[in-house]
């Protein structure tokens, strides 16, 4: 039992004793048998004690949930791009996506870097668009490989069109994004607006 609970029980015991004394009319007879102000005070104390116990019972669960969320965030952030700035991150993305394509037996046609942009409040998105020709099965396998890559990658866009009606291959344009901590792209951090200003 916590010290706070013991203190609340002592207060409650004292209030009960006072209530018993008043009910026995030792000091002065009651005008009516209706509830006295002391009984109202006891009800308030009981309510406070119940709330304190309820809060204490919930606290470990809340802490456990917070710890689990922190662990998940740490695991996710270990999968961010390792480059020190957006320019190096673009080169890292080119290498990562090229390796994923090669692993699926797909030849990269062309690639184009997109604009690095802030994503939420803590990350910078580093997009890369690639063009290639593959089979439908290879595309399915590639999208699964991107989702399960050691680095955190997301598919932002997929455009597909048949290469030839008689051949089971498709032309694909895909945009894949990786992520950096925003502090590695300080140019994207919004500066607070200056107070005042000219009219």
Image: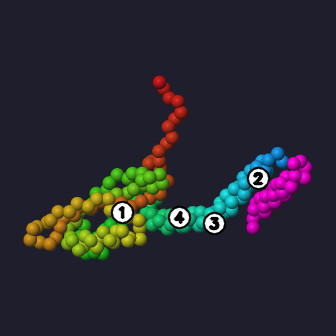
Return the residue at label 4: 69
Q: Position of residue 60 (x, y in %)?
A: 63, 66
Q: Main secondary structure of the magenta part?
A: helix
How many residues crowd around disc 3 within 10 Å: few (fewer than 14), some, or many (20 or more)? few
Return the residue at label 1: 154
**Residue 28 belongs to the span the image colors magenta:** yes
The stretch in magenta equals 1-29
Q: Disc 1 versus disc 3: distance between alpha carbons?
A: 35 Å
**Closest to the observer, 129 or 40:** 40
Disc nearer the start of the sequence (1/3): 3
Q: Residue at x 34, y 57 (%)?
A: 127
**Figure check: 189 above or below 198:** below
Which mark lies nearer to you, 3 or 4?
3
Q: Disc 3 versus disc 4: distance between alpha carbons?
A: 14 Å
Return the residue at label 2: 39
Which mark lies nearer to you, 1 or 3?
3
Q: Residue at x 57, y 63 (%)?
A: 66
| Residue 90 sits in quarter | bottom left
Q: Residue furthest front?
A: 32
| Residue 8 sits in quarter | bottom right
Q: Residue at x 65, y 65 (%)?
A: 57
Return the residue at label 3: 60
Q: Position of residue 136 (x, y in %)?
A: 21, 71
As helix, strand or loop, the secondary structure at mark 1 comes to: strand
| Residue 148 sits in quarter | bottom left
**Closest to the observer, 156 or 18:** 18
Which mark lies nearer to you, 4 or 2?
2
How many residues crowd around disc 4 within 10 Å: few (fewer than 14), some, or many (20 or more)? few
Q: Disc 3 versus disc 2: distance between alpha carbons?
A: 33 Å
Disc nearer the start of the sequence (3/2): 2
**Figure check: 102 above or below 80:** below
């Amino acid at each position: 039992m916590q010290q706070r609970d013991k203190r609340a029980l002592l207060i409650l015991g004292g209030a009960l004793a006072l209530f018993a004394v008043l009910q026995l009319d030792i000091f002065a007879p009651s005008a009516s048998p209706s509830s006295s102000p002391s009984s109202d005070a006891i009800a308030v104390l009981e309510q406070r004690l119940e709330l304190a116990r309820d809060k204490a019972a919930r606290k470990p669960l809340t802490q456990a949930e917070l710890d689990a969320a922190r662990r998940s965030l740490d695991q996710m952030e270990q999968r961010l791009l390792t480059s020190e700035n957006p320019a190096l991150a673009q080169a890292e993305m080119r290498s990562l996506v090229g390796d994923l394509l090669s692993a699926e037996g797909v030849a990269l046609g062309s690639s184009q870097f997109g604009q690095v942009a802030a994503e939420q409040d803590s990350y910078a998105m580093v997009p890369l668009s690639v063009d290639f020709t593959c089979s439908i099965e290879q595309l399915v396998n590639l999208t699964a490989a991107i989702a399960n890559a050691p680095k955190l990658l997301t598919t932002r866009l997929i455009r597909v069109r048949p290469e030839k009606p008689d051949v089971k291959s498709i032309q694909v344009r895909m945009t894949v994004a990786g992520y950096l901590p925003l502090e590695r792209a300080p140019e994207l951090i919004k500066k607070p607006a200056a107070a005042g200003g000219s009219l």
